[in-house]
Image: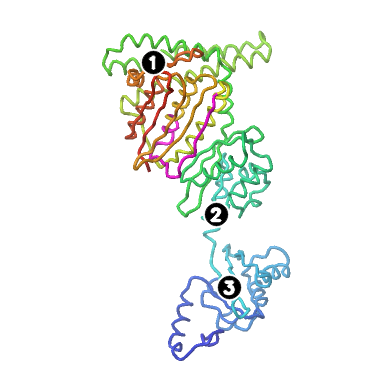
Amino acid sequence: MRLAQLPVELGDADADVAPVVLDALDCLRVAVTIFDSDERLIYANAHYNYLFRSMPRAEGLPGRTYDELIRLEIVGGETALDGEIEDYVAARRAQFRNSDYAPRDIRLCDGRIVEIKARRTAEGGWIALWSDATHARHVLVRLEDAIDLSADAFAFWDSRDRLTLCNADFAQLHGEGRSEDLLGINFEEMIGNTVRRGHVRIDGDAANWIARRIETHRSPAGTLTVEMASGAAYLVRERATRDGGRATVYTDVTDRRRVESALKKSQIEAEAQATYLADLTARLDAASSEADAAKTTLLRTMSHELKTPLNAILGFADLLRSTAPRFSMDQIVEYSGLIHMAGRNLLRLINQILDLTKVAAGHFPLHSNPVPVASVLHDAFDQYRAAAGEKSITFRIRPCPADAIAMADEAALMTMVRNLVENAVTFTHNGGEISLSAERAGDVVRIRIADNGPGVAIADLARIVQPFEQAGRSTHNHPYGAGLGLPLVKSLAEMHGGALILQSAPGEGFAAILQLPAA
């Protein structure tokens, strides 16, 4: 096929260019074909014969219809048919006739997969590009198999926030039986449909929940806990991908949430643990004049000492389960569950002590990444909202600016914020107020947790950030804690190159400001 035969007008100046353009088209690793309005081939480059090796040379193909070319593929044993010949030919021609411009894959008998992309020309004909997509499709199949084997629900989004790939677990969570039914849907539309169909359990205004969910999705790195209508709970992690899209992972944390709920019901065991820790704190206060090295030794000793009652609680729970005939089934389930959960709570306190020991020894690992502060505050807000409600506390979280992104270890940042929020809920009077907010100031991010509780004397502010130290914040309706939360927050903040700033006075409430480097 000569370039002069193409449906363009070439002047004298183009005559020298024509052979160069033809040579360039023949060098492409994509087959280029041009058809007129009657579906007759006008031009095919050399790569067309590379894809379809049994076909006549490209120079001898012009004038044949697309129908004839498809049948030549079939006769030459090129195409792997799936069904009747006429149905196959009609489906292929529909890509032209119905202006169905979506790419189409055809399978060849030798295992290759060819992708066809077609577009209309100004003269009413078609241009079709044919490329070998075998490797890309095989990679996609392997990825699909991998995520189908995962226990988590996966989804991938393109740069326009449209769903390109997900596994069956993800589709089922959003009310679809097959993953194919969600492909191409925009994230915002999908979340709106999920909420309207009642698949998600929402406390409060649905529009606000959807807006927060979209905010988490669009953050560079965001996390959120979502509770489904079935009662199952999922930790949702969102990350931007290198191609401008996003990846979403849902991890089932139902059992963890159930354990947390059971611990809230273990008031007797929790009070006993708090009393025990308060006694230990009093014993350690007597040694307050010792050096930091001696206090670190006491921390290690205390961590081992705490394991003794922990083993007793867990051992008694196992004994109670093994003597089922003495108790009713309801009693066995209730008592063994409460004791076992109390033991796990005590183990959590041990881990907190061990964290302080690691910090003091310089062995606490940090993996800093950009972390949106909004997602961390919302996580703490969700976790302690019920506890605040039990005390009729007005619990607010103020909107965070989009640039409030800290350079921090995400797990350590969550630990710091949760400790500060738990502190506020614990020491605030019934009917009080707590507010969570964040701002960016230059190269730092400030996270503020404030309450209108009884406050702390200015002289005591420096003392309460030392391990096992207490100051008068009692609301007369809870036991003293072990004095470990604020020291741990202070130590972790300083490891990040930040600081913990406390503002308070008796009767004027208490504010903890966590200052960290900005991303």
Q: Pick whichever, 150 or 477, lies toward us.
A: 477
The amino acid type found where label 2 is placed reads Leu
Task: Report which residue position mark 1 lands on.
Answer: 471
Residue 474's quadrant in the figure?
top left
Residue position marked by numbered label 2 in the rendering:
140
Q: Which dot, 2 or 3, sits closer to the camera?
A: 3
Dot 3 or dot 1: first in sequence order is: 3
Q: Name the disc covering residue 128, or none.
A: 3
Mark 2 or 1 closer to N-term?
2
Instruction: Return the disc, 2 or 3, that comes first in the chain's sequence.
Output: 3
Q: From the top left corner, tell me how far across and down residue 186 is, in percent.
A: 59, 52
- The image position of residue 461, as x and y in percent, is 35, 21
Q: Amino acid at mark 3?
A: Ala
Instruction: Indicate the position of residue 510 as horizontal and vertical percent values.
Output: 42, 24
| Number of the label disc, if any, that sits on residue 254 | none
Callout 2: helix, strand or loop?
helix
Instruction: Tell me where residue 154 sits by quadrant.
Output: top right
Which residue does the image show at 50% across and 23% down from the upper left? 425
